[in-house]
Amino acid sequence: MLPLLDDFLAHLAAERNCSPRTVEAYGCDLRQYARFLARHLNVTAPDPARADALALRGFLGDLARKGGVAGGGRPAGRRTLGRKLAAVRAYYRYG
């Protein structure tokens, strides 16, 4: 799991006044990013500080091709990729 994830989600709800659906979606997106990082970095507890732009591009590319970390799903559309990128960017800005 990502460090500060619960704090970040609380921040979105309380201080940025995001809707509960947005908070839930960002939480799901960031957990999915953490699973990708764990696989990409070959670790059990990913450190987001070790991720670089290439890792983020790999995450988005994986979603666009296979629809997710486990694959088997539909490829993600542009809007979905944009939201996931926004979630990751906001998380890094927060932390």
Image (cartoon, rainbow, N blue to C red):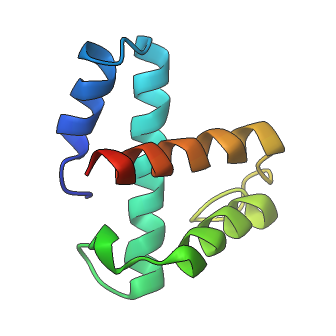
In this orientation, which residue lies closer to the viewer: 81 or 93? 93
Q: Residue at 47% across / 54% down in the picture?
A: 32
Q: Residue at 40% across / 13% down in the picture?
A: 20
Report the number of discs.
0
Residue 28 x/y as whole percent: 45, 40
Q: Is residue 18 above or below residue 24?
A: above
Q: Is residue 59 left or right of residue 37?
A: right
Q: Is residue 86 left or right of residue 32?
A: right
In this orientation, which residue lies closer to the viewer: 90 or 26? 90
- Residue at the extreme bottom of the image, as rendered: 42
Q: Is residue 80 above or below residue 30?
A: above
Instruction: Check the picture and name the quadrant holding the N terminus.
Output: bottom left
Q: Residue at 80% across / 54% down in the picture?
A: 75
Residue 69 x/y as whole percent: 57, 65
Q: Quadrant of residue 13?
A: top left
Residue 81 x/y as whole percent: 70, 48
Q: Residue at 26% across / 17% down in the picture?
A: 15
Q: Is residue 22 left or right of residue 69?
A: left
In this orientation, which residue lies closer to the viewer: 37 or 51? 51
Residue 31 x/y as whole percent: 39, 51
Q: Is residue 30 above or below residue 71?
A: above
